[in-house]
Every structure is written in C-alpha cells, then in structure tokens.
Amino acid sequence: MTLYDYPDCPFANKVRIVLAEKDLEFETVIVDLKNNQQRGPDFLRINPFGKVPVLIDEDCVIYESSIIIEYLNDEYPHPPDLLPEDSADKARVRLLADFADRAFTLPAMAVERELAQAEADENKLQTARGVVGKTLAMLERELASKEYLAGEFSLADIAFAPVALQLNRYGVSLDSSLANVKAWTARLAERPSVGSVLKLVA
Ligand SMILES: N[C@@H](CCC(=O)N[C@@H](CS)C(=O)NCC(=O)O)C(=O)O
C-alpha cells in the first residue's frame, strides 16, 4: 500500500490514523506541494483533483480522505470497526465526519494560510476562527454525555482529531467553556494511533 502524503496535512493525517488503528503497513510518497508537484501531469493522472492524500492499494487508486478512510474500514474489517453497526448511527458518523472536513479542517487551513502571509487579513482570520469556534461549541454539546462522538471511537473522531489536537497551530485555544472537548482531546491523544501520527501541541 502506498500513501501519497504531505507532512502535517490534516486530511492525510486522518488516513494515517486509520492505517495505524488497523496496524497496516504502507509506504509514503511525499508530494512536493510547495513546488506544485500536485499540479503536474504525473500526479494528476493519479488524482485529477491534484490533492493529497491518495492511497494506492494494489490496483485500487483512491483519493479524497473521507473515501479513503471508509475504504480502509471496509477492506480491512478486523477490529477495530470504526463505523457503528446500525445504519442510522452510521449515517450520523458520516455527517459528523463530513462536518469536520467542511466546518473545522477547511476553516482551520484558511487560518493557517492567512497566518503564512506577510500581512494577515484580520477579517479573514476572524471569520475563519469564528467558524472553528462554532464547531468547537457544537462538539462541546455533542460530547456532553459521551466519551466519543458516536459513543465508541469512530471515523467521526478521526475526522476531527488532526485539527482538534493541533489547535495551537491555528491560534485557537480551549477555554473553560469547552471542558468536554478538552477531556475528549485528552482521550484521543492517549490512543497510540493518534499519538503516533500527530505532533500533539493542543
Ligand atoms: N477534500 C480533500 C482535501 C485534500 C487537500 O486539500 N489536501 C491539500 C493538502 S492538506 C492539498 O493537496 N493541497 C494542494 C492544492 O490544493 O494544490 C480530501 O479530503 O482529501
């Protein structure tokens, strides 16, 4: 198995956590995003969207991190199963995982992009951090009576973990109103899969 990756890409980190959970061996190919290797013809033949991560498993080429992690859970069903059994619960996990990509990881990356500018646009920063903040408040409510987002550890937790455990990178901190989120990030950090993949700075 080969993972086309880029260091600290939160989407690739979701995949690496699932690979670690499943104890799967893989090779890494680093795509040089800084020099636009993802826009070259060789990479676009692998992923027409020109983005990492991409997973190649024998003759199966998969891109989009949410599709890759579902594939890994299907193809390597040995424990842990990272999706619940019940269809409605499964749909809920998928909704949360999709929400993580759209309303947490993407705005967090927008913050990072802005911080990398010589002069950050304060309005853009505030807007993107505001979206991250609203999602943290939603997580706080979700986690009121649960250890993990779906009760048991699942793909939903994995989808949030790369940003949730590296909030300092985006200039966001967990204040006292986010006690459930704080306890959840501590639980996530204790998992060997998560701890081995993420540089834990939150
Ligand atoms: N929806 C994609 C997003 C992947 C993505 O945005 N990857 C970034 C790196 S973290 C990338 O490849 N950026 C290169 C570019 O957009 O040119 C997924 O979930 O896999």
Image (cartoon, grey):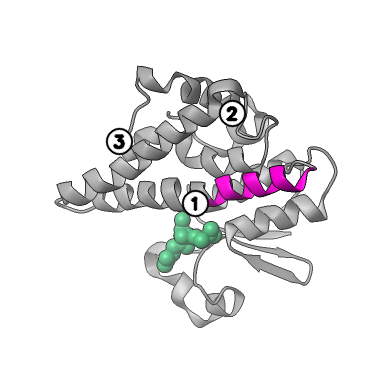
Circle number at residue 101: 1
Pointer 3: what residue? 171
In the rendered image, is residue 166 in sight?
A: no
Q: Dot 2: what SS?
A: helix
Considering the whole magenta stretch, tell me its main secondary structure.
helix
Residue count near mark 3 (Cα–Cα under 10 Å), binned few <14, some 14–19, many ≥20: some
122 shown above or below 194 = below
Q: Is residue 162 magenta?
A: no
Q: Which quadrant is the C terminus positioned in?
A: top left
2 vs 1, front mark: 1
Point out the stretch of residues depicted in magenta.
Answer: 86-98
Q: Is residue 93 magenta?
A: yes
Looking at the image, residue 9 sits to the left or right of residue 61; the answer is left
Looking at the image, residue 147 sits to the left or right of residue 33; the answer is right
- Residue closer to the observer: 197 or 69: 69
**Residue 201 place in picture, x, y as percent:** 43, 29
71 shown above or below 183 = below
**Disc 3 to disc 2: CB gap under 8 Å:** no
Q: Dot 1: what SS?
A: helix
Callout 2, which amino acid?
A: Leu
**Residue 168 place in picture, x, y as percent:** 36, 33
Who comes first in sequence, dot 2 or dot 1? Answer: 1
In the rendered image, is residue 98 in sight?
A: yes
3 vs 1, front mark: 1
Pointer 2: what residue? 188
| Residue located at (48% from left, 26% from top) | 181
